[in-house]
Image (cartoon, coloured by chain):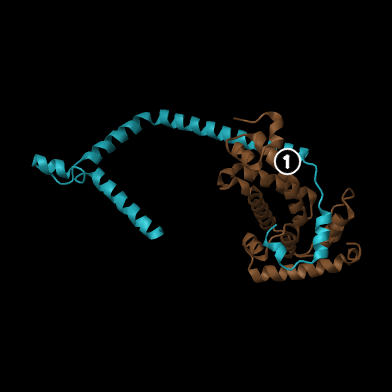
Amino acid sequence: MSDGMMEEHDPELLALFAQAEHDLPGEDFVAGVSAAIDRARQRRRVRNVSLACLFVLLEWLLDTPLSQGLGQLAVALESTLVPVTTPWLQLLLAPVNSLAGVVGLSLLLLHSIYRRVWN
Amino acid sequence: MPLRAGHYAEGAEALLVALALKGDVRAFEELTRRRQSWIRQLLRRCCLDEHLADDLAQEVFLTAWRKLRQLQEPDRLAGWLQRIAITTWLQHQRRAQLPTGPVVVEELPAADRRPDVARDLDRALATLPADQRLCVVLSYHEGHSHNEISQMTELPLGTVKSHIARGSAALREHLASYRSRT
């Protein structure tokens, strides 16, 4: 029983509500719920299989352009922003002196701004 | 490991919740079996329509099955289910744009199988506007405090108090013939 019973309640109304209580037979209802759960699970299974098929189909159709695009992206990300000729300086600046480095640092910065704003 | 067929009926609720979380439908069926009467009666008192209440109750258990992972503490299943039931009812009310006023008594389904007290209580509840009825049911049927009702229904505390006061007065008037019997 919760605090509700501490508040003002008409005892006669409480008694009437209690008298009106009766157990409802549940087997049909439980069967209905089980059938609804089965249908929901089946729908989810069909959706997952459809998504998987769609993914495979897209992967098959876009195989060549995708691999070419990814290759070009990898090359672009590796490209240096500022040409450095000294080998040791080149190594030292490698993490930031590329498009990938700038993208990575930008993402870190955005993440920290997001955390400061929302926390 | 799933329980043996006969053991579900004896299993503790928290254990059944844990099994249902692992996808054991029979454990969830047992939970439904134990809680269905209470949830259906709560919804029947709210909407005063047996068939609609049962449909909504089915929706409640289906939602519970889908969102079971959101239940942080398995021993709080009852309160969690009740919240889903109230949300489902309020959403249905908004979606179906049900009249918020009293229900016309003649429209209540004939329920000859039910005890008279239940029928008369439903008839008396039908005279209350929907929000007032929900507050009275949550207070008298479920034993919730005004604060809890305010949180559940998202109604201001003052409104909840006035709904319960007015609703109780109206019920007392409609059920005056029972006063000497109780």
Q: Residue flagged by tag 1: what amino acid is it?
A: Arg
**In the visual, does A114 lie left or right of B165?**
left
Q: Is residue A27 above or below residue B48?
A: above
* Residue at the image point whose x is 72% and y is 30% from the top: B6
Colour used to depict chain B in the structure image:
brown
- Residue A90 seen in this snapshot: yes
Tag 1, which secondary structure? Answer: helix
Q: Is residue B89 above or below residue A104?
A: below
Q: Which one is in front, B109 or B147?
A: B147
Residue B8 lies in what quarter of the image? Answer: top right
Picture coordinates of residue B122, whole percent (x, y): 82, 58
* Residue at the image point whose x is 24% and y is 45% from the top: A101
Specify the subunit that label 1 lies on. Answer: B
**In the visual, does A97 lie left or right of B64?**
left
- Residue B126 seen in this snapshot: no
In the rendered image, the residue lying farthest to the left is A86
The residue that disc 1 covers is B33
Q: Image quadrant for the N terminus of chain B?
A: top right
* Residue at the image point whose x is 35% and y is 33% from the top: A66
Q: Is residue B139 above or below residue B23?
A: below
Residue B96 lies in what quarter of the image? Answer: bottom right
> Which chain does the cyan colour mark?
A
Picture coordinates of residue A52, whole percent (x, y): 49, 31
Q: Residues within 10 Å of mark 1 (few under 14, many from 20)?
A: some
